[in-house]
Structure formats: structure tokens, C-alpha cells
Image (cartoon, rainbow, N blue to C red):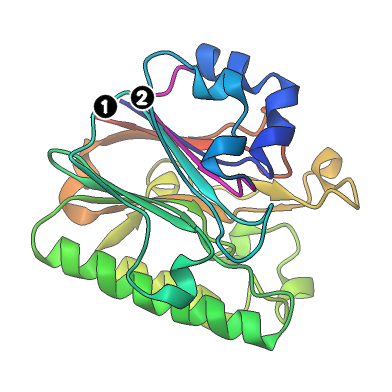
Amino acid sequence: MKFISWNVNGIRAISKKGFVDWIKTENPDILCLQETKATKEQVPKDIQSLEGYYQFYSSSRVKKGYSGVGLLTKIKTEKVEFDLGIDEFDVEGRVIAASFKDFVLFNVYFPNGKARKERLDFKLRFYDTFLEIVNELKNRGRGVIICGDVNTAHKEIDLARPKENEKVSGFLPVEREWIDRLLNSGFVDTFRIFNGEGGNYTWWDYKSRARERNVGWRIDYFFVSENVKDRVKDAFILSQVYGSDHCPIGIIFE
């Protein structure tokens, strides 16, 4: 099975950039989208009418054109949830949790902490709550797959200019430490199973035309619980795919 995750930076915007044709060509079994910036009703008709996919969307209830996630899956789900059970997080439409026969998939658009201290605090509370939830599922023996825009680069190898960004949200020690905790609790960064090299990024700043120079950050991930690690046969970054300030990432899951 091919799983792909992509922060599309607006599903209505990317629909005008050959998005449907790309889906048909790439043909993922499961496609997770973040930062859709649209309600279910606002999703373009050519996406809604894609054959072969069950589709689920969650959007912000507090701010129009903000946040939002989407799930397109060829595999029938057993249950789909759209929240973490805590209202301060759930009103922003950041989570779709889909239960399948032998694993649970979390498609998450994690908060960005750059705007102000309150948003960084919000991000860290979100991180802690999310970790409790996925650990509880893992400890019950469930296979767990987590994908999405985590909004944090883990190691120095994961961004082009680590020294210049040591005090910037997205590379703060407290944010990076949360990824350490996630991994230490029994999850695996799938890309690093197959590739230990630098220069592999998933987000580039639009304003500085950073993508042309590959001055980027790897902030989009697929994490899996240890009990399904052996089913991951490949992990990849589709850096040649344009249409957003992020590029798609994916795994092949047996």
C-alpha cells in the first residue's frame, strides 16, 4: 500500500495546479492532506468526485480558511474520528484519526508556534496530549501510523541552517525534545530507516525563494509504532512535486 501525506497550503488553490491529475498518476491507496483551508463543502468538485476514494474532511470552527485536514482512502475504514477530545484543540480542525483492521492512522496538522508565545504554549500542550493518546493505543497493542506537518525539524540534519534557527520556533530544544520523547516511547521516523543524509527537506519559505536553493526544513513525517515497523518497505520525499510550499512525503506499507 502506498500512503502519501502533503500539506497542500489550501486545497482550493492546489486544485488549480493539476492536483487531480497528480493524484491519478501517483495513485496512492491513502492520501492525507493538511492545511486544506476549506470546509467539506468548499472542496473542489473535481476532487470530491474522484473515483475509488472514501473522503473525510475536518475544518476549523473558529476561523474560516484556516487549518483543516483531509483523508482520501481506497481502503474502507472501521471508524473515523475528528478530534482529540479536548475542545481547545478540536475547534481548529487539525486531526483525522482513521481506524482500519490492523492499524490506526492519525493525519495531523500540528500547530505552528512562531506567531507568539501563546501559540508556542498551545503547540506544546497539543504535542503532550497527542503523545498520551498514541501511547495509550500503542500500549494496548494497536499498530499506529502518524503522518502530517509536525512543524518541527528534529535534528540539525533536518534543516539547511540549524545554527541560525536555534531560537526559532520549529527548531527550539523543547520542540525537538518532544520528537525525542515520541521516538523513545516506541515510534520510528520512517524516512530515517532508509535515508540518513542531509539535504532532504519538505518545506521551503516562499518569500525568499528558498526552494530554488534547497534552503529548507524537514518538518513533515511518517512515524510508525515499533510493532508495525517491519511492514514499512520504503519511505520517500517527493521533492520534485510542486504546488505548495511543502512537498508530499510517503511510505510503502505492506
Disc 2/disc 1 C-alpha distance (Å): 7 Å
Which class describes the residues within 10 Å of circle 1: few (<14), some (14-19), or many (20+)?
some
Quarter of the picture containing the C terminus is top left
Q: Secondary structure at mark 1?
A: loop
Where residue 61 sits in the image (x, y, percent)?
55, 61
Task: Identify the residue position indicated by label 1 in the image.
Answer: 75
Residue 167 occupies which quadrant of the picture? bottom right
Which class describes the residues within 10 Å of circle 2: few (<14), some (14-19), or many (20+)?
some
Which residue is at the far left?
A: 140
Where residue 175 sits in the image (x, y, percent)?
54, 77
Q: What residue do we see at 70% from left, 31% from top? A: 14
Disc number placed over residue 164 in the picture, else none: none
| Residue type highlighted by circle 1 | Ile
Write the start and end of the magenta stretch as one range: 27-37
Answer with left or right where residue 86 lies relative to residue 22: left
Q: Which of the two residues, 26 or 83, is positioned nearer the viewer here?
A: 83
